[in-house]
Image: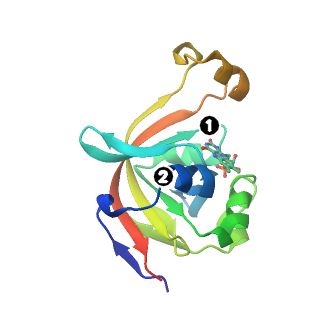
Amino acid sequence: MAKFREIPVNNITRNPFKLIGEDWGLVSAAKDDGCNMMTISWGGVGIMWNKPVAFTFIRPQRYTFSLLENEEYFALSFFDEKYRDALSFCGSKSGRDFDKVKETGLTALYDEKAPYFEEAKLVLICRKLYGQALGEEHITDPDSVLKFYNGDDYHKMFISEIVKVLKNED
Ligand SMILES: Cc1cc2nc3c(=O)[nH]c(=O)nc-3n(C[C@H](O)[C@H](O)[C@H](O)COP(=O)(O)O)c2cc1C
């Protein structure tokens, strides 16, 4: 059984560029009969409205997107390298077609109604504060529009308060 300890947000020592961009994370949210999760490697952490926040960018076609729209809370979970295969699975298969908890063998735990994973090393429990879809008219770098979008798949940015940080001390 993992030993999670709540730590202050300022005690996070992991480099967010590596943590999010290279190690990747799972965004997880509750659904009627459990939870679903998807891999992310874009996003960030910082301060907004004097609160510690996480920035996530989710495309509307993701199954997780529909869950995030309904839920007030979600979690961001970060893992050791040995879970790379599970993260690859969660980043290439949809919860519409698979029970990803079952398929990956990860163990869902719940906090503030947000599901997270016993196998994670670091967990951010997040409460949504703001959500807005990116739009072509606001993107000042035309190359990014061409490179990343087809016209109807602009990410929605969620700014969410980090209400709890859990560190796995196992
Ligand atoms: C490394 C990696 C990073 C990803 N980052 C994001 C991301 O930041 N935002 C996003 O919308 N999709 C991202 N994806 C794609 C989703 O994880 C993927 O489409 C997933 O299958 C969606 O699952 P769902 O339909 O169960 O929500 C990423 C995929 C991988 C492999």
Which label belongs to residue 16? 2
Kind of element beneath mark 2: helix
Return the x and y of residue 137 as percentages of the image width and height. Answer: 55, 13
Q: Is residue 30 left or right of residue 152?
A: left
- Viewer-closest of 25 and 27: 25
Return the x and y of residue 12 as percentages of the image width and height. Answer: 38, 61
Packing grade of label 2 (10 A; few <14, some 14-19, many >=20) is: some
Looking at the image, residue 27 lies above or below residue 131 = below
Q: Residue furthest top?
A: 137
Looking at marks 1 and 2 on the same chain, the residue that comes earlier in the sequence is marked by 2
Return the x and y of residue 158 as percentages of the image width and height. Answer: 45, 39
Residue found at x 61% / y 36%: 60
Can you tell me whether the CB of the residue at mark 1 lies under 8 Å from the nearest atom of ligand 1? yes
- Viewer-closest of 17 and 96: 17
Residue found at x 40% / y 49%: 72
| Circle 2: residue type | Pro
Return the x and y of residue 20 as percentages of the image width and height. Answer: 55, 52
Report the Cα–Cα distance between label 1 and label 2: 21 Å
Which label belongs to residue 59? 1
Looking at the image, residue 40 lies above or below residue 116 = above
Residue found at x 65% / y 24%: 144
Residue found at x 64% / y 16%: 142
